[in-house]
Amino acid sequence: MPAPTPHPPEEPAEAPTLKEKVRRLPDGPGVYLMKDRLGRIIYVGKAKSLKKRVASYFQASRNISQQPKIRALVEMIASFDIIEVRSEPEALLLEGRLIKQYKPRYNTDFTDDKRFLLVRVSLEAELPRFVLTRLRKDDRSRYFGPFAYSNLVRKTLTEMRRQFGILLGDAHPVKIAGEVYRLYDDVRAELYGHANEVTAADYRCRVVAACEFLEGKSREWLGTLRAEMQAAATRQEFERAAKLRDIVFALEETLAKTRHFERAPVLLRSDEVALLLLAGALRLPGPPAHLECFDISHISGTFVVASMVHFTAGRPDRDHYRRFQIKSFVGNDDYRAMTEVVGRRYRRLYDEGRPFPDLVVIDGGRGQVAAALKAFLALDLVPPPLVGLAKEHETIVFPDERPPLNLPLTHPGLQLLQRLRDEAHRFANTYNADLRSKKIRESILDDFPGLGPLRRAALLEHFGSIAKLRAAAAAEIQEVPGVGPKRARALHAFLLGARSPT
């Protein structure tokens, strides 16, 4: 019988080509990461439509003849990954974080190629001048910038010449006698009250003052750019926000190398990112700087309490935490308790003329949110934006006709709401436990026969706590009015024999 013909080993399935991967891409927002043949990330980009944007890199008809860097990038691409997000603001912020994390070669090249203006001060010169340049050199000069708005920096230098009496790039100082220089022609009015004929040492004092001013001005511009970037993202002007973000990157990188103070965070803090994305998800007019969250805590309808925690700029602000005991009823009714504490909180803010928070969060679903809304309606107050967070599926519910919202568990805005809700829950449970512990300690005296409410109150007032009463001698106990020697000895023995509450 002939031996069976061996079959060749099965070849592994071929990996999909780039074009096949592109055809499978989703038509939604996200971030794409281009990689070279070694798997290194060489470019990070964002897209409103991942499918259309990534496909554009591999279209033969795309005109890239005048963009050599883009042509070089496309030739280097061996693979790519994507990260899907829910919205363009998320894509914008994620792109920035990934660029900062990986520092891809081609993102850096594109940013550097903008060549924003720098201010160069030639410190080794006898009379340092303040000149504009677009190139940083490895010399002993001091650089400020880069500055995105050339007209502003030019005007600033002109004003600095008047304020500090410094030399700009168009100056031609002349040495007139010994160590004395004439900085400008006598007819130059820019120096105003500053002497035009000075020694090099005197002039350097002006340079130091001007550098300090320019350093402070750079910080001011950086803050302005950050504010403009966040405002553009809030208005959904994503291209402008991305451009401003790149400028912020460049400005921060350069200032970090030329200053001696601590570097500010790049782009936005994680809390600011969360607030910005939360505002977009909830359709708020702007990032909610002040958030308050309410939670009800009880044990089978007893020891019913409520908590309210306050976050400022995405972080706990414990000076504004509040806790409540329910006053309007006795029993187990979460909705009624929520209506009471929300009404008490915002009636007080209204009466004191204090502002309401930017967002109120209720721990619970539609019932709890409706109960909170009822408090505002009963007081004839206009409620601030109000949502609930139902724990089972982390569902966001609204008091109006909007359907419930389920954000991805990785969404920074949802994670902020979770931290807020969990903090309110912790604060309420702590208060509930404190009350129960206090009640248990005080209830020990209820078990001692023949000790009425007046004597119990007198004992607690005299000693301040059960622990101190337990530590007292019988002679000390009998000093309390209404407690004789016999009763004091019996109570002392009782307390020593009673088990400590756990």
Image (tube, rainbow, N blue to C red):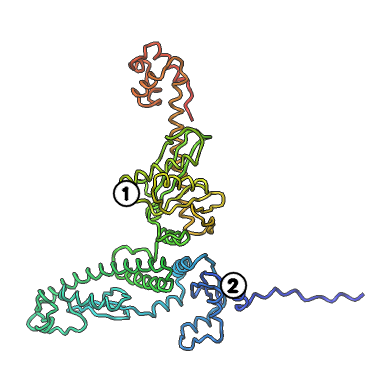
**Which mark is drawn over residue 213?**
none
Which one is in front in this view, the residue at disc 1 or the one at disc 2? 1
Q: What is the x, y in percent for residue 6?
A: 82, 75
Question: Quick check: 138 above or below 325?
Answer: below
**Mark 1 packing: few (<14 Cα in 10 Å), some, or many (20+)?**
few
Question: Quick check: 362 above or below 276?
Answer: above
Instruction: Measure how far apart labels 1 and 2 are at the Cα level.
Output: 51 Å
Q: Residue furthest top?
A: 486
Q: Quadrant of residue 473?
A: top left
Q: Residue at x 50, y 40 (%)?
A: 334
Q: Please give the residue where the numbered disc 2 appears in the rendered image.
A: 25
Question: Quick check: 427 above or below 357?
Answer: above
Residue type pointed to by label 2 = Leu
Q: Quadrant of residue 322?
A: top left
Q: What is the x, y in percent for residue 436?
A: 46, 32
* Residue 283 visible from this viewpoint: yes
Q: Residue at x 27, y 78 (%)?
A: 151
Residue type pointed to by label 1 = Arg
Which numbered disc, 1 or 2, marks the residue that appears first in the sequence? 2
SS assignment at label 2: loop
**Mark 2 packing: few (<14 Cα in 10 Å), some, or many (20+)?**
some
Name the quarter where the N terminus is drawn.
bottom right
Q: Please give the residue where the numbered disc 1 appears in the rendered image.
A: 354
Q: Residue furthest right?
A: 1
Compare residues 171 and 192 and report the one nearer the observer: 192
Q: What is the x, y in percent for residue 136?
A: 32, 78
